Image (cartoon, coloured by chain):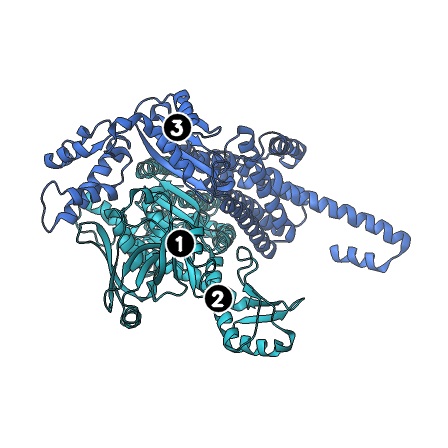
Chain colours: A cyan, B blue
Amino acid sequence: MNKNLLAKTALIIVVLIVFLFGIVGIPSSPTPQGLLTAIQNRIHLGLDLKGGTHLILQVQVNDAINLDTDRAVDRMKEALKNANIPFAEISKPDPQNHPELIQIKGVPPEQASELRRIVSERLPEYDLTSGAENAWTLAMKPSVANDTKKKAVSQAIETIRNRIDQLGVSEPVIQEHGLGDYQILVQLPGVDDPARVKEIMQSTAMLEIRQVISGPYPSEQAAMQASGGVLPPDAVLMKGSPLHQQNPEETQGDVYWVTSRTAAVSGNDLRTADAGRDENGRPDVNFTLTGDGGRRFAAFTGAHVGDKLGVVLDNRVKSVATIQEQIHDQGRITGSFSDQEVHDLALTLRSGALPAGIKYLQEVTVGPSLGADSIRQGVRAAIIGMVAVMLFMLFYYRAAGINADLGLFLNLVILLGFLGFTGATLTLPGIAGVILTVGMGVDSNVLIFERIREELRHGKTPPSAVDQGFAHAWVTIIDTHVTTIVSAIILFLFGTGPVRGFAVTLSFGLAANLFTSVFVSRVIFESILNRHQRGEALSI
Amino acid sequence: MELFRNTNIDFLGKKWYFLAFSLIFSVAGLCSIFFWHGIPLGVEFRGGTLVYVKFAQTPDLDQIRTAMDHAGLKNPRIQRFGPTTGNEVLIDLGMQETSEAALDKGKNTIINALQVENSSNSGKQDLNNTGAASLEQYLLQKDPLHLGTDAATRYHAMARQMEDFRNKERGGILTSVDELRGVVPPEVLSAMQQDFYTSSFVVRNVEIVGPQVGGQLRHQALMATLYSLAGMLVYLWFRFELIYGVGAVVACLHDSIITVGFFSLLNKEISLTVIAAILTLIGYSMNDTIVVFDRIRENIKLLRREPLADIVNKSINQTLSRTILTSGLTFLTVLSLYIFGGEVLRGFSLALVIGIMIGTYSSIAVAAPMLVAYQDWRAKRAGEAVARSMSTGSPKSREKVKVKA
């Protein structure tokens, strides 16, 4: 055997070993069971094959904008009051569809320049435009609004990831979903009952501790009456569940509290939260505050000994207690919770609040038994098909059929090895890509062999027929492969999920095929010709 | 062994038959798309709620329908799914029962309606519809083996074993908790006998798609396909000539239309996996066409004197052996997928079974004749131009003819 050929053979063997490593890694034991688990660790199966839950959710980014503009309304009122500028009303005309707009009414025209100055000083991220009848519109700058929305999405992803990690789901996928606006894709392998996970993901878990001014009242009207018809400017009305069933009649419906408008501390100030039980054995959540939050809380409680404070969760008053003494950095949330509820509440509080509500757009659950069936049947069908093709090649092309079969086998090894190395997932459409690859692999071999036969028929010697056959078929193979790879790349760029899985396996497979059906097959032919006597016929 | 040797079939002479054949199939498909079934879209494209349920015994569809009626679901589509021995049923709620405000309401209603018959087991968990994660949690809480430090790993493995046994050995459904005897230690079994029951069904697969996502996916699948066709057109333009690219892309469109038309005629749903199959057949048909085109390009260089029609005929004949072999072998793979691949792959492999046949046909009968037709048309136009330029003497058109010659 000549040196050149030896080097090429060595290269092929190295490639084979490298990609075999890609598939199985280093198996813990050489038994079939060990090999199987090794493969399962390396080749990631998509949810459609493995079973699990696939969710697409949308972040209600308007919530985040509303949060910001609400704060701006408050700041504006305060600033105008401090500057002694009279105004009739500061409000948001359409929080549902245009959360970025704030309307200011009744500022006298002669104080317009003063208003402008305050806005540019205090709210630089807003644009002020004047309208008819002393009405002014404050609009959040589009760039700022965009940033706020993007930040809401990335923060939501972060929060959801925290929560799912704490649930112990293995290998979850949580990422922005490029298909639509502000959408997030969540894939949870092995989760076949998503109800609880969905609830945990969806709870905004916005925690606040506010001063409770008065309450509880059985209805909104009662609360207003008790405050003399008008609420104090820095107070708001909040709903809450009836507390601690002292009065069974009261457990029906909500109760109302008058609380301070601003929170003393919020969920951002939490350091930890844990499920526990109170002295009566009822489940509750204990929390500790961060250093800064603790200081603010201590100042607040120190100034309000004897007053009541309320723990407000997602805009509902959960528990109310009287401040007995200054509290530094600890607190707890009590209420009528079950064990599961306090556990989940502590989890969501630890992972931080969602910046905006989320809405589910798509939910697909593949039961594990279906995924197992799909794999079993898919693999069986693929093996039957492959074996039939391989047998036919042997039968039709005799010795050259071995070339094709070896090439096909190596092609699959390289393709699976690629998947193992890159961590790409194999999905059902991915299997379609594998089938197209196998088809094109067979095709390349057929192209070459038919061409060699043609050249032999024209009376060429075996070495020159092989040479010419490869040379002619090469042009065609390059064209077919490049065209398909071009389309696969475009599918990858413009497609999502399943279509991408198809594009990935197809590109890998075609790249591998260029190597196996052209290079490997050629080397085998050459080594056969090398051993042959001059003029001996080629088995093809 | 050789099957086709020195064939000499006049393919171009049969172009009118080909045209008639293609027209019949395309028009039949298009008629079905526009006037009959439309394009039956899979749930991911149209939105809706689909629940696949497997029963322990042969399910009574009327009974299920009554249960759904009682639960207040309007006109669900209920049909058998897969082989009759599989006892599987598909319940499709369509869009009107699917709102984005409460996406999984329909699914929960279905499951609750099916649970009604098992109401005597209230307070127990349903072993058939419990995943390994929940089983593990149950074992950890109950701790029937009184394990110490290694409880987490032991129970984790045990939960997996139970799930594997149920899904792989028993096809996803157990008829009683006793079946786990031998799979788990007796202490665990006796604890589970108290806390679990086995319902007569298992939910195999749930797909819920809101209206927003469906529209996006439809748009996106279509655009991705069109872009990829455009990409191939540009590459072929660069490697051959524009008309080659056009011929190949028209052949691919022809294949896609006929395949989608077939799905419409058979009233089979086009799901995302079927789209993957259509992409596969486009790739496959393109491959076939390029092989013929390559041979034509090569022969044009070799046989300068012969008319294009003869060259095209010769090229198709020379590559015929390869064409039949490759498509035959690929067809074999796909057929095996269709027969053995199971219900989930059925739509996918059906698209490929149809597509491979049409794709092979189209590269011979659509793409190659288009080259000849185009050349004939150009020659005719050039002839007319010559005639015109002779009468008017326009120098511009004379120049054009010269360039062509």
Packing grade of label 1 (10 A; few <14, some 14-19, many >=20) is some
| Residue at 25% in and 44% down | B133
Q: Amino acid at mark 2?
A: Asp
Give, as a three-letter code, the residue at label 1.
Phe
Mark 3 burial class by Cα count in 10 Å: few <14, some 14-19, many 20+: many
Q: Chain of mark 3?
A: B
Q: Position of residue B185 (x, y in %)?
A: 11, 36
Q: For the residues marked 3 and 2, what is the alpha-carbon distance in whole angstroms? A: 48 Å
Which residue matches tag 2?
A147
Quarter of the picture containing the N terminus of chain A is bottom left
Q: Nearer the viewer, residue A402 or B215?
A: B215
Tag shown at residue A515: 1
Q: Is residue A455 above or below residue A130?
A: above
Which residue corresponds to the image point at 9% horizontal and 49% vertical from the top-left?
B148
Q: Amino acid at mark 3?
A: Val
Q: Which image quadrant is residue A262 in?
A: bottom left
Q: Which mark is residue B89?
A: 3
Say above or below: A38 vs A321. Answer: above
Q: Where in the figure is residue B150, as x and y percent of width and height? A: 12, 50
- How far apart are the two marked residues, 3 and 1, measured between alpha carbons? 46 Å
Q: CA distance from mark 1 to mark 2?
A: 47 Å
N-terminal-most mark, 1 or 2? 2
Q: Which chain does the numbered disc 2 sit on?
A: A
On screen, residue A510 versus residue B40, left or right, reads: left
Please identify, in this view, whether the residue under mark 3 or under mark 1 is nearer the observer. 3
User: Residue drawn at (61%, 77%), measured in percent from left and top?
Assistant: A111
Q: Say which element carries label 3.
A: strand
Which of the chains bears the disc numbered 1?
Answer: A
Q: Secondary structure at mark 1?
A: helix
